Amino acid sequence: MSLARPAAQRRRFVLEAAERISPSVRHLVLSTEDGAPFTYLPGQWLKLYLPGLERDYSIASAPSASRPGRVELIVTQVENGPGSTELHRLPIGAAIEALGPNGLFVREEAERSQPALYVATGTGLAPLRAMIEDALARGETAPRTLLFGARTEADLLFRTELEALAARGQLRYEPTLSRAGESWPGRRGHVQVHLRELVVPGAHVYVCGLSRMITEVRAVLRTELGLPRTQVHSERYD
């Protein structure tokens, strides 16, 4: 049985904090203006209403019992992109309207006892970070691996946080760089080339990023590795 999705509502949020976490990505922390809880499932997204336009962003944090009205987003600055430009210059304390939660890209209860492989590129990490935080908060014991693709070391979002989880044995963290420098000791190339090594029996795979990457990842998982359609879950953001 699928999890019940909370009904989407139009709400006002206030920008509580913000920081640049890579040369092009800003991390935003929003809280409901009235302080009321905002109910959503990890993996869902918000529609933001900006001056003259609307933009959709996945929530990059799990629901928190201690801060039930708080959500986090990560936004890439797109050259000449009116939405991302507005969000990159949004001042602390500014109010913004949003509609949510939206989306079907969530982990079902039956999947929580199975190994999980999370595959992301760029800000596709957002919903997967929320899922990982939620799994940790629930005390799930099944193995979890994050395969995260970026161009350079500077583009590794939440690197310190993810490396800390790996050091504590709470996550297998496998970053791969498509434009790695000579000193980079880790994986190189696109995420697709590392799937064969990281998929384990019974794993559910959660993939988020650009359409081309998702198409290629799904082809490897299903055609070469034989994963059933029911074990591959994806969401495109282009």
Image (cartoon, grey):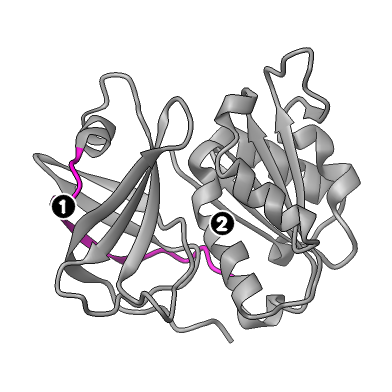
At x 30%, y 75%, the residue is 38
Q: Position of residue 31 (x, y in %)?
A: 26, 64
In this view, the mark in front (2 or 1): 1
Q: Position of residue 213 (x, y in %)?
A: 62, 35
At x 79%, y 42%, the residue is 220
Q: Is 207 left, or right, of 21 in this rendering?
A: right
Q: Is 161 left, or right, of 73 in this rendering?
A: right
Q: Is residue 2 magenta?
A: no
| Depth order, front residue of 51/12 | 12
Quarter of the image with the C terminus is top left
Q: Position of residue 44 (x, y in %)?
A: 43, 63
Reading the image, the residue beneath label 2 is: 129
Query: Could you classify mark 2 by the number of other residues whose Cα lies within 10 Å: few (under 14), some (14-19), or many (20 or more)?
Result: many
Reading the image, the residue beneath label 1 is: 93
Q: Is 143 left, or right, of 147 in this rendering?
A: right
Residue type, numbered disc 2:
Arg
Segment tinted magenta in the rendering: 90-107
